[in-house]
């Protein structure tokens, strides 16, 4: 598991192996189906990971921060089983046992990846809302950005009024 000092994500993640062997054996359709199944559920995150090194067992997924790996997820209902497990259901398939050193390394890498993904999503949400984040998921109004947006709208309206007569003349 990650060190206690590492910040854990606010929600669990399903992490899908994107290595070449897993992709060739059904990892891409598995991930695409998981995107569909988990799209409307904000309680579970989904991420791709370069390779877990368990190629003979693929396609593979890991659950973070739990640190559980599962393999042989190449059948039609594998994604549904993974999604059910992510939401508290039974394990989706064969549990994989990674050597302790590999397991620790992958968990640390996943912690860093997920921390970066969550930070990027929070920044994007703040940009879309026009505010600055407080760090608690809420936003604070950005007066400078608001004034700029209002000025742009005013200029756009003036420009439309100015251009409409010219456009009418060229069409006649």
Image: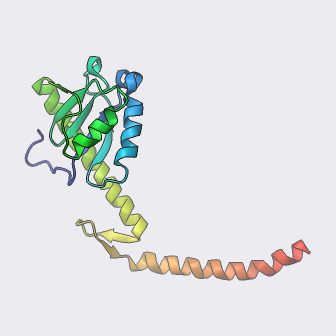
Is residue 15 at all visible to an observer of this figure? no
Residue most extreme to the top: 56
The location of residue 127, given as percent across then percent down, is 40, 65
Quadrant containing the N terminus is top left
Q: Which residue is drawn at 28% across and 36% down?
A: 81
Residue most extreme to the left: 4
Numbered circles on residues, count: 0
111 in relation to 9, above or below: above
Quadrant containing the C terminus is bottom right
Q: Residue at x 26, y 42 (%)?
A: 84
Q: Which residue is drawn at 37% across and 62% down?
A: 125
3 in relation to 136, above or below: above
10 in relation to 83, above or below: below
Q: Nearer the viewer, residue 70 or 124?
A: 70
The location of residue 115, given as percent across then percent down, is 25, 49
Q: Which of 62 and 39 is in front in this view?
A: 39
Quarter of the image where one finds residue 23? top left
Residue 51 lies left or right of residue 152; in this view the side is left
Q: Nearer the viewer, residue 3 or 20?
A: 20
Quarter of the image where one finds residue 13? top left
Q: Which colour scheme is used?
A: rainbow
The location of residue 65, given as percent across then percent down, is 17, 43
Residue most extreme to the right: 172
Is residue 100 at all visible to an observer of this figure? yes
Residue 95 lies left or right of residue 60; in this view the side is left
Quarter of the image where one finds residue 134? bottom left
């Amino acid at each position: 598991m990650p060190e206690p000092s590492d910040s854990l994500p606010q929600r669990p993640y399903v992490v899908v192996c994107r290595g070449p062997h897993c992709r060739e054996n059904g990892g891409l359709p598995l991930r695409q189906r998981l995107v569909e199944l988990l799209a409307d559920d904000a309680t579970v995150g989904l991420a791709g990971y370069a390779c877990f090194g368990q190629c003979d067992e693929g396609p593979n997924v890991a659950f973070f921060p739990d640190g559980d790996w599962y393999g042989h997820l190449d059948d039609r209902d594998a994604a549904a089983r993974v999604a059910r497990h992510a939401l508290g259901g039974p394990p989706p398939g064969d549990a994989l046992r990674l050597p302790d050193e590999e397991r620790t390394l992958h968990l640390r890498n996943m912690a860093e990846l997920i921390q970066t993904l969550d930070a990027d999503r929070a920044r994007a949400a703040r940009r879309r809302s026009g505010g600055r984040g407080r760090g608690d998921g809420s936003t604070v109004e950005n007066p400078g950005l608001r004034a700029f947006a209002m000025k742009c709208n005013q200029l756009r309206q003036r420009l439309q009024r100015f251009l409409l007569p010219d456009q009418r003349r060229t069409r006649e």
